[in-house]
Image (cartoon, rainbow, N blue to C red):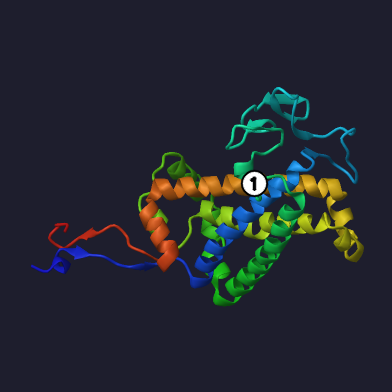
Amino acid sequence: MDATQYMTQDVAKRHRLSTRIWHWLNALVATIMLMSGLMIFNAHPQLYWGDFGSREDYAWLQIDDTRTTGFVRIGDVSFETTGVLGLSLDAKDNVRRVAFPGWATIPTAYDLAAARRWHFAFAWVFALGLTAFMLVSLFNGHIRKDLHVRRAEWRWAALWSDIKDHARLRFGNKMNESHYNIIQKFSYIGVIFLLLPLLILTGITMSPAMNAAWPWLLDLFGGRQSARSLHFIGAVLMILFVVAHLIMVLLSGPITGIRSMITGRAMPKSKPDQGGRRP
């Protein structure tokens, strides 16, 4: 007997084409920018607030070594990170006294000029891609239909219910629905409209050429060193978002999640037919 007699299965639209293209392009571009950015950070592994900063000035963040151990210092609190940050071994067991090890950077060997070329080249792709995605999402209704937070979703009961479901890993079939839940909406709105523009603007602020063209950026972020600190913090927040995103995909079903981001459609769980049977 035909299996369709026992199963009713709907294919739900999940992601628009513009969202899927931007998602995979961003995954590649963000990875390259992060790794090249870590190499740039290796040139001066300290962060400051204000306009100026040097080895002799107080840094709120420092990743360095004491020649025998690696450490990370945040404010007045230090953590030993030997073997991971500050001081580590390369693939040939040679000691590397740099903030981030070679496997985490582009290029793997110390080369500030090359890292800057990688970073700046893909920064254009990153910025133009975000701009194009925002414009397309505005015209195709993605922002209005999928990211707009409706009045009912602002209710504390609805928000708390979704928080409890996520905390208990009770996703049900929510991750396969054609619309985003409130936590997803807040996350995507925060990343797309706040975090990514912050990374772009703080990156521009660190450029002397852009300082001459747009000097107001230095006032906006409180100086070049403050912009560098905010850029680093933004990158860390982006990493945390990606990690949380990947965990949610794994917990909710990686095959379904990846398939929907490739094809744009999600296949919900099969439903019983009228006789209560499943395929």
Q: Position of residue 62 (x, y in %)?
A: 76, 33
Q: Camera-side residue: 87 or 73?
A: 87
Q: Quadrant of the N terminus?
A: bottom left
Dot 1 falls on a residue whose secondary structure is: loop
Q: Is residue 120 positioned above or below 61 on the image?
A: below
Residue type beneath disc 1 = Thr
Q: Is residue 240 left or right of residue 272?
A: right
Image quarter for residue 126?
A: bottom right
Q: Position of residue 87 (x, y in %)?
A: 68, 30
| Circle 1 residue | 108
Q: Could one spot residue 131 in this view of the protein? A: yes
Q: Position of residue 191 (x, y in %)?
A: 62, 55
Q: Is residue 42 left or right of residue 172?
A: right
Q: Camera-side residue: 32 or 278?
A: 32
Q: Is residue 143 left or right of residue 171?
A: right
Q: Is residue 194 positioned above or below 240 on the image?
A: below
